[in-house]
Image (cartoon, rainbow, N blue to C red):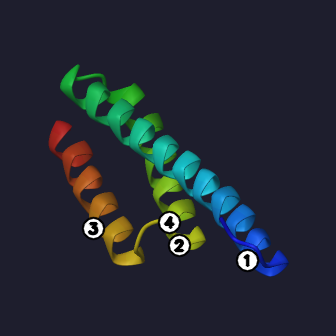
């Protein structure tokens, strides 16, 4: 355990940021999973709304630095391709 006050603070800050990042990443995975389920069920309306949510979550995660921006762009592109393949 840290003895110095600033080191104790860094530990607290790191734990807080880790928890925040974990929440964002979990919400992102859930949004993508919901989109995949809608595509599998062949539900076009639900797929469109869940695509919007998933792409918004990807953008937010990329902006916050939780995921890399190129990874977010690649995922959005692949999700859009799946959505377009439905039609």
Helix or strand or loop: what does disc 2 sit on?
loop
Residue 57 in picture, x, y percent from top left: 52, 52
Place of residue 43 in the rendered image (x, y in percent of width and height, measured from the top left): 30, 22
Residue drawn at (18%, 37%) of the image: 86
| Cα distance in 3D space between marks 4 and 1 | 23 Å
Residue at image mark 4 = 66
User: Disc 4, disc 1: CB below 8 Å?
Assistant: no
Q: Is residue 6 above or below residue 57?
A: below
Distance of mark 3 from mark 1, alpha carbons?
Answer: 38 Å
Q: Secondary structure at mark 3?
A: helix
Label located before the other in sequence (4 or 1): 1
**Direction from residue 78 to residue 73 in the image, left or right:** right
How dense is the environment of label 1, judged by Cα within 10 Å: few (below 14), some, or many (20 and up)? few
How far apart are the alpha carbons under marks 2 and 1?
Answer: 23 Å
Residue corresponding to mark 3? 74
Marks 3 and 1: CB-CB under 8 Å? Answer: no
Q: At 44% from the left edge and 39% from the top edge, which residue is drawn? A: 31
Residue 7 placement, left or right of 40: right
SS of the residue under disc 1: helix
**In the image, is residue 49 above or below residue 4?**
above
Q: Tell me, for residue 7, which label it has, or none.
A: 1
Number of the front mark, 3 or 1: 1
Of labels 3 and 1, earlier in sequence is 1
- Disc number placed over residue 65 in the picture, else none: 2
Q: Nearer the viewer, residue 68 or 77?
A: 68
The answer to whether the residues at label 4 and label 2 have Cβ atoms under 8 Å apart is yes
- Picture coordinates of residue 71 (x, y %)? 32, 69
Q: Quadrant of the N terminus?
A: bottom right
């Amino acid at each position: 355990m840290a003895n110095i006050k600033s080191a104790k603070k860094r530990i607290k800050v790191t734990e807080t940021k880790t928890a925040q990042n974990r929440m964002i990443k979990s919400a992102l995975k859930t949004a993508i999973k919901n989109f995949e389920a809608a595509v599998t069920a062949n539900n076009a309306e639900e797929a469109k709304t869940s695509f919007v949510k998933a792409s918004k979550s990807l953008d937010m995660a990329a902006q916050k630095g939780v995921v890399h921006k190129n990874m977010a762009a690649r995922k959005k592109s692949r999700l859009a391709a799946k959505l377009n393949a439905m039609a």
